[in-house]
Image (spheres, helix red, strand yellow):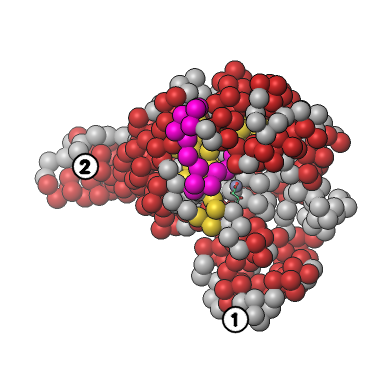
């Protein structure tokens, strides 16, 4: 329907006589282009390059039809997980401070009681206007539940009737996610042991593996001790045998999780000057991680700027943002031209320099509006700036979903904003007389949502 509208308009435009008619057609054309852009962005399947989601085979603590619950299961889903998302825990301790309800009391409560507390404090006793609260409402509505009923019991009964694997298909369909990329944290005992117990644990084509190894770069001495315990003898001094064993460790786990890329998150204090700058992180990167990844042809993702546990009592909600050093990223991209780097930074203040850095290095792919940046006003600002500086050569978003159904709101909220930005950008070029076709618009949008990522990981889009 939309393409014929474009076609008719195209023809009409050439046969216009009076200014009035031309102006009306220009407005109509802008409207038609906008409609196609929004349709393209809202319907384009997306390969979600960073989530904390897992197939049901990793176990799930949620009660469900057809799968026994596993208290340490890694697949989180359902309304109680949505409500106890660490973003909402942080917001709840703002309105019911530790003095009124101690951290210890909160963490000793059942998941359901925690969810009841958060629902009462953030949804009933105050309007749920924060992005994380709004996300819960968007998700309930998209799943066919009525947020207006404010009936948590009814929502719970509905989720308990769902069968996890079918529910994953439903959520992927609703959010337009074609493939879910996991974050396989090999230094997490709960996860590592599940892989060792069952090498087929992730045999689910809906999910792609990513090897995540923060301690290796953040805290080599501690990581060396763990590698030694796991059969990869390594010393704090990172001598040659340690380098070889650490490389062997990475290769073994890249194979085990069929990693499509490897990733770490790094603190704001992270600095890379050169391989010889004397820091453990620079030595581990230049002697272990980057040589292995260059050899395997796998990109390395750096998520920079998370200051961990400034308030440990908040657990996952206790991390903070900090300004980071973009020059360390440019130096790495420059010193390791055979490596491909994904990079996202947590601080708003780093976004401009990071986008400019990507203009300097083709082996640097900027992605996502991470964590505290995943808010409409900032997604708009960052995406607009990136289109202006990088055209279509970046990855606008990832969901970072920790709970399955978050895919629904994180993508619907971001898609609307990305559509707004692109509509303005196409309108700008149309005003010059450049005529964009529907085919071109859909091609461009596919690049942003699937093509740029699949090309960078050199894996065919699903
Ligand atoms: O390091 C990360 O992958 C972060 O995304 C998470 O640790 C963080 O807690 C989160 O959920 C952000 O959205
Ligand atoms: Zn994450």
Residue furthest to the left: 18
Of marks 1 and 2, which one's residue comes earlier in the chain? 1
Query: Does the magenta run of residues contain 219?
Result: no
Confirm whether residue 434 shows in the render.
yes
Q: Which residue is mark 1?
A: 125
- Which one is closest to the eye, mark 1 or mark 2? 1
Q: Nearer the viewer, residue 90 or 431?
A: 90
Residue nearest the observer in this picture, 137 or 297: 297
Residue lying farthest to the top in this orientation? 295
3D distance between C-alphas at marks 1 and 2: 48 Å
- Residues at badges 1 and 2 in contact (C-beta under 8 Å)? no
- Residue 369 left/right relative to 65: left
Report the front residue among 9 and 104: 104
- Where does residue 30 sit, x and y in percent of width and height? 29, 46
Residue 129 lies, in percent from the top left, at 51, 70
Dominant SS type (magenta): loop
Q: Which residues are magenta?
A: 264-277
417 in relation to 262, above or below: below
What residue is shown at x 54% (from left), y 35% (from top)?
279
Residue at numbered disc 2:
431
Secondary-structure class at tag 1: loop
């Amino acid at each position: 329907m939309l393409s014929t509208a474009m076609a008719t308009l195209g023809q009409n435009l050439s046969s216009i006589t009076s200014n009035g008619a031309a102006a009306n057609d220009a407005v109509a054309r802008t409207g038609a282009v906008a409609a196609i852009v929004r349709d393209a962005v809202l319907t384009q399947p997306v390969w979600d390059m960073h989530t904390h989601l897992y197939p049901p085979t990793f176990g799930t603590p949620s009660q469900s039809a057809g799968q026994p619950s596993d208290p340490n299961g890694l697949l989180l889903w359902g309304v109680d997980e949505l409500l106890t998302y660490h973003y909402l825990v942080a917001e709840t301790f703002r309105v019911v401070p530790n003095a009124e309800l101690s951290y210890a009391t909160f963490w000793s409560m059942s998941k359901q009681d925690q969810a009841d507390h958060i629902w009462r404090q953030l949804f009933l006793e105050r309007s749920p206007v924060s992005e994380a609260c709004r996300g819960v409402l968007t998700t309930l509505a998209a799943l066919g539940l009525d947020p207006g009923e404010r009936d948590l019991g009814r929502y719970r009964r509905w989720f308990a009737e769902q069968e996890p694997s079918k529910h994953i298909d439903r959520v992927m369909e609703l959010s337009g996610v074609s493939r879910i990329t996991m974050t396989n944290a090999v230094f997490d005992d709960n996860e590592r042991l599940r892989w060792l117990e069952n090498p087929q644990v992730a045999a689910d084509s809906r999910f792609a593996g990513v090897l995540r190894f923060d301690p290796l770069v953040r805290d080599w001495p501690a990581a060396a001790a763990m590698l030694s315990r796991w059969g990869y003898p390594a010393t704090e001094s990172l001598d040659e045998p340690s380098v070889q064993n650490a490389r062997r460790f990475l290769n073994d786990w890249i194979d085990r999780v069929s990693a499509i890329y490897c990733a770490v998150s790094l603190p704001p204090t992270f600095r890379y000057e050169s391989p010889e700058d004397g820091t453990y992180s620079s030595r581990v990167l230049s002697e272990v991680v980057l040589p292995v990844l260059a050899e395997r042809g796998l990109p390395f993702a750096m998520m920079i700027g998370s200051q961990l546990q400034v308030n440990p009592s908040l657990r996952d909600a206790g991390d903070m943002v900090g300004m980071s050093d973009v020059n360390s990223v440019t130096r790495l991209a420059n010193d390791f031209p055979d490596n491909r780097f994904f990079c996202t930074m947590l601080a708003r203040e780093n976004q401009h320099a990071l986008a400019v850095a990507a203009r300097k290095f083709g082996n640097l792919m900027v992605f996502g509006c991470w964590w505290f940046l995943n808010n409409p006003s900032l997604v708009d600002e960052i995406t607009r700036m990136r289109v202006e500086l990088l055209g279509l050569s970046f990855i606008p978003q990832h969901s970072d979903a920790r709970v399955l159904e978050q895919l629904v709101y994180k993508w619907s909220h971001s898609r609307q904003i990305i559509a707004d930005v692109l509509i303005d950008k196409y309108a700008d070029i149309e005003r010059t007389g450049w005529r964009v076709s529907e085919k071109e618009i859909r091609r461009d949008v596919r690049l942003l949502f699937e093509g740029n990522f699949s090309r960078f990981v050199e894996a065919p889009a699903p």
